[in-house]
Image (spheres, coloured by chain):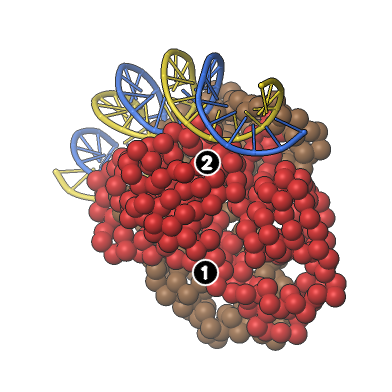
Chain colours: A brown, B red, C yellow, D blue
Amino acid sequence: MSTILSLARIETGSRDEARQFRKSVLSTFRAPVTISEHLHMLREFSSRQQFSRNETIFSEGDDAIHVYRIISGSVRLCRHMPDGRRHIADFMLPGDLIGFAECAEHPFTAEAITTVTLTSYPRNQFDRLGEGDPQVRANLLSLVSTSLWTAQQHQFVLSCQNAKERLASFILRMAARTDVLSGGRLDLSMGRQDIADHLGLTIETICRAIAALKSDGTIAVPNSHQLILKDTGALRALSEGNVPQ
Amino acid sequence: MSTILSLARIETGSRDEARQFRKSVLSTFRAPVTISEHLHMLREFSSRQQFSRNETIFSEGDDAIHVYRIISGSVRLCRHMPDGRRHIADFMLPGDLIGFAECAEHPFTAEAITTVTLTSYPRNQFDRLGEGDPQVRANLLSLVSTSLWTAQQHQFVLSCQNAKERLASFILRMAARTDVLSGGRLDLSMGRQDIADHLGLTIETICRAIAALKSDGTIAVPNSHQLILKDTGALRALSEGNVPQ
DNA sequence: CGACCCCTTGACATGCATCAAAGGGAGTGG
DNA sequence: CCACTCCCTTTGATGCATGTCAAGGGGTCG
């Protein structure tokens, strides 16, 4: 899987493409825009809700009549196949918006990973927010564009990377999203099964990949919900495909 | 890969979830919106270009100063890893827009699969298009949302499906995009390697999956660039995961 | 007619899935 | 405070789908 496909294709892997790729992997996964502050204008229409672990916030196919903003806790956005297979499209963290894309129905199920507090805004009010304000419109478009970019990045991970590389990509992304730097401690609210379903692997493979990174000295694992990033350079090398395997 | 993960997770695969999933797979992959007609207003700024097979239209990291609309031919949007691995995020067909998402730099390389004719519009003019017209804005947002939806759908394919299922999903999507119905003839402009890099598989696996569908009587293969859809029901069953394997 | 390119098929290798069982850690009841 | 249970994680043994390597096959273009 990780070997070179043909000589013709090696030639395309030039130095500046490597640079581009690096840039693409490291660039902001998090929206640089803060539509959130504009949400303040909708406070009179908003309501606060709380969900406990594994509770469903909304289901795939439900009418998308609310937009949610996470106050605390984390959420998984997932889809189920009839036979029980599950895919987690993404994890949502405090500050993130859910359901802002233009969809009549929610395209996935949202479930609480931990206890979750969130604010919900009526969809029609939310849509009205941009009507008068070009700044809000730009931010909203930017937000959707960023999600698109993130989804395509993840496509790439699922399409091209092996287990260890996928895990490295995941760790780096979560670290970037929660502002954890090299040497820092990364809190993972989700369990191993969630990570597996996000990366298109099994729980056992996730465990083994974590064990491998641990024995490489790339990370330390004080407990199953925390990681210490001991060598972010190695993680980057893995996630950028510089060194297959 | 294709077997059930746990009893608890079977229970979630209820009848109406199956319905939802079916709906999601079959719903429009193609944007129901036609921002294209509004592009007519930019005709004085536009210019027509032609590219021949395998020619690069723009590269990953290039400044996104144009938006393109395909007149004829097809295009692959791809990303390269330093070691030569390649991922094709999507194929673009006549009528499709490229580069409309809000990005300062193109997030991927666009290459001509066949001879391609396209119209290019200056990015700044394109952005101005929506300023005065709420309808255009709505269409643009809808376009990006549809792309996001498509990307997440593809994540799902890459994350959960085996080779035969991925191929079935791909065939159904291409058929839907080119309005090919059951029993019809589907033209595939891209080669096997392109399909492989889109589905996260190797060219040999693509060949074998095609051979398998052929020997099932699900498709016929008059030549390597055309397929006859003999049993779309079987294709749907595969792509929806009703029958693992 | 020949060269090239892409597709196809076969034989073998391997990374990950699967199956199985043991090892924590947190909460609960005695 | 300990014993017990449950759930999640971890590790091992084995199998299989897909990758890899290799050798033809068939169409197209000069």
Nearer-the-camera pick, A219 or A108 = A108
Query: At 71% across and 29% down in the image, what residue appears?
Result: A8
- Res. A171 visible in picture: no
> x and y percent of residue A50 in the render?
42, 68
Q: Is residue B225 above or below residue A142?
A: above
Q: Dot 2 surroundings within 10 Å: few (below 14), some, or many (20 or more)? A: few
Query: From the image, which quarter does the C terminus of chain B lie in?
Result: top left
> x and y percent of residue B178 in the render?
53, 61
Q: Nearer the viewer, mark 2 or mark 1?
A: 2
Output the chain of dot 1. A
- Res. A14 visible in picture: yes
Q: Amino acid at mark 2?
A: Ser
Q: Secondary structure at mark 1?
A: loop
Q: Secondary structure at mark 2?
A: loop
Marking on residue B222: none
Residue extending farthest right: B45
Query: At 42% across and 75% down in the image, what residue appears?
Result: A63
The residue carrying mark 2 is B224
The residue carrying mark 1 is A99
Q: Amino acid at mark 1?
A: Gly
Q: Quadrant of residue B165?
A: top left
Is B49 positioned to the left or the right of B172 in the image? right
Output the chain of dot 2. B
Is B111 positioned to the left or the right of A152 in the image? right
Query: At 59% across and 81% down in the image, what residue appears?
Result: A127
